[in-house]
Image (tube, helix red, strand yellow):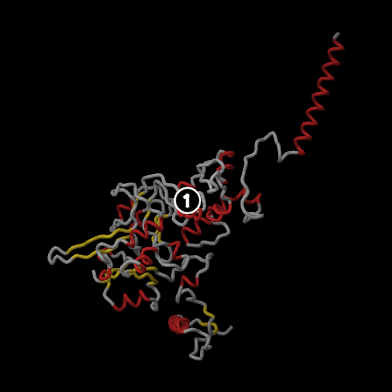
């Protein structure tokens, strides 16, 4: 099969989104074997669509969440509620130690009195300090940028909890039962936001993002930061967005707009 | 006197041997049904066959599960063939209230055999030991 680049005379049955992907892939890599047959980047246009159950997460993808604080109300906790429900997080009436994967934080500028509310969870850093310090390799970053705890190897030392500048991780102090099938949790291990990895693998959005858009202020946007055609990439290219504690150089995958 | 006693002993030995052989033959015939060795009472799963041969699963189920565990956890591979969730769904044992039992119940599929083999498993410290949709249905009824 000879190598040739994608020509403008592509067959008409391609829909526009696929077409634009073909164009960008050809421009970037130029490894079209024939119209519609590519060596590289099949997963780049809409990776979740392209990924089957038996395929590993792709390193071409970097999942991220953009949160528009102009739409995030102080009193709204839809994302927190949705997270607890989705992952079966139950409190024991002990706020200091109860598991908390996402929380609402109210911040106020003392100089001007201007206050804002923002959801805070695992920021899914590109260079996560929790992974650096983990003595067993239980804390790890998946190929697509999601930072997780492998509870099979977690010994519960909580070093990662100390290392995380976002206070994103929780330790399970109590024996649990009837956990969610997709979110196994157990006493003696550390856990945090998984960006609803089970939903992402199923081509769905994280529960917090879905709830925010359904019943909340519509502040959250989930997508692939590596795909220039994705909505989130266009938004972060167009508007000024911030990573919290960007001075640490951790390159979080969660970005805030209007902070 | 001695000769008579000897013949009686021989007769007793012969009788015992015959009874013994009969018992052994009987035991071999009914090995699976009523053996002298107690077998665990294992519930059968849904469908005709497991995802692999029964003999293979008996010996290697943990290897298979461990492999799948790492694939799913580290790489996000969620194929169903060897997933623990599918095991739990298929091998659910209904309790007296027809709701699948948890591993707390000795009739639980995994536990029935692991109790017998005296092998401790800690899967269910974290993983749900019964199908989830049934819990949801139960919650809806209330």
Q: On the picture, is B23 further left or further right than A204?
A: right
Relative height, residue A237 to residue B54 (above, below): below
Within-10-Å neighbours for mark 1: few <14, some 14–19, many 20+ = many
Relative height, residue A48 to residue B47 (above, below): below
Element assignment for label 1: loop
Residue A30 position in % (x across, y down): 47, 83
Q: Nearer the viewer, residue A215 or A238?
A: A215
Farthest residue toward the top?
B1
Q: On the picture, is B52 further left or further right than A107?
A: right
Residue A157 position in % (x across, y down): 36, 47
Farthest residue toward the front?
B142
**Residue at horizontal 39%, vertical 78%?**
A229
**Residue at horizontal 55%, vertical 45%?**
B95
Q: Nearer the viewer, residue A48 or A131?
A: A48
Q: In this figure, which residue is indicated by the disc labeled 1?
A: B127
Residue A225 position in % (x across, y down): 37, 72
Residue A104 position in % (x across, y down): 28, 60
Q: Nearer the viewer, residue A28 or A90?
A: A90
Q: On the picture, is A204 further left or further right than A219?
A: right
Q: Quadrant of the N terminus of chain B?
A: top right
**Residue at horizontal 50%, vertical 89%?**
A7
Farthest residue toward the left?
A111
Q: On the picture, is B123 further left or further right than A146?
A: right
């Amino acid at each position: 099969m000879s190598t040739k680049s994608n020509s403008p005379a592509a067959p008409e049955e391609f829909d526009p989104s696929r077409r634009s992907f073909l164009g960008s892939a050809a421009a970037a890599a130029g490894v079209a074997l024939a119209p519609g047959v590519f060596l590289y980047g099949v997963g780049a246009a809409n990776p979740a669509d392209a990924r089957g159950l038996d395929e590993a997460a792709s390193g071409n993808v970097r999942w991220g969440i953009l949160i528009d604080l102009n739409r995030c109300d102080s009193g709204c906790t839809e994302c927190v509620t949705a997270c607890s429900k989705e992952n079966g997080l139950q409190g024991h009436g002990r706020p200091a130690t109860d598991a908390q994967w996402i929380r609402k934080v109210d911040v106020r500028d003392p100089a001007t009195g201007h206050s804002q509310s923002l959801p805070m969870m695992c920021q899914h850093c590109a260079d996560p300090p929790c992974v650096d310090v983990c003595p067993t390799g239980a804390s790890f970053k998946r190929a697509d940028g999601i930072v997780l705890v492998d509870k099979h190897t977690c010994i519960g030392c909580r070093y990662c909890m100390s290392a995380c500048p976002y206070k994103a991780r929780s330790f399970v102090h109590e024996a649990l039962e009837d956990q969610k099938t997709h979110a196994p949790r157990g006493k003696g291990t550390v856990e945090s936001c998984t960006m609803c990895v089970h939903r992402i693998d199923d081509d769905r959005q994280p529960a917090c993002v879905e709830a925010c858009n359904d019943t909340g202020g519509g502040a959250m946007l989930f997508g692939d930061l590596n795909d220039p055609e994705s909505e989130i990439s266009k938004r972060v290219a167009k508007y000024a967005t911030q990573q919290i504690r960007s001075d640490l150089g951790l390159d979080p995958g969660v970005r805030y707009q209007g902070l | 006197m001695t000769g008579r006693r000897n013949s009686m002993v021989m007769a007793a030995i012969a009788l015992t041997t015959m009874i013994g052989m009969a018992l052994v033959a009987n035991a071999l015939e009914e090995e699976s049904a009523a053996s002298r060795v107690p077998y665990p009472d294992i519930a059968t799963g849904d469908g005709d066959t497991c995802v692999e041969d029964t003999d293979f699963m008996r010996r290697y189920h943990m290897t298979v599960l461990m492999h799948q565990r790492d694939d799913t956890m580290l790489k996000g591979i969620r194929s169903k063939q060897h997933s623990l969730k599918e095991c739990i769904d298929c091998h659910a044992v209904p309790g007296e209230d027809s709701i699948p039992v948890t591993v707390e119940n000795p009739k639980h599929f995994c536990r029935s055999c692991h109790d017998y083999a005296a092998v401790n498993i800690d899967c269910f410290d974290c993983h749900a030991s019964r199908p989830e949709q049934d819990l949801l249905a139960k919650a809806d009824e209330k």
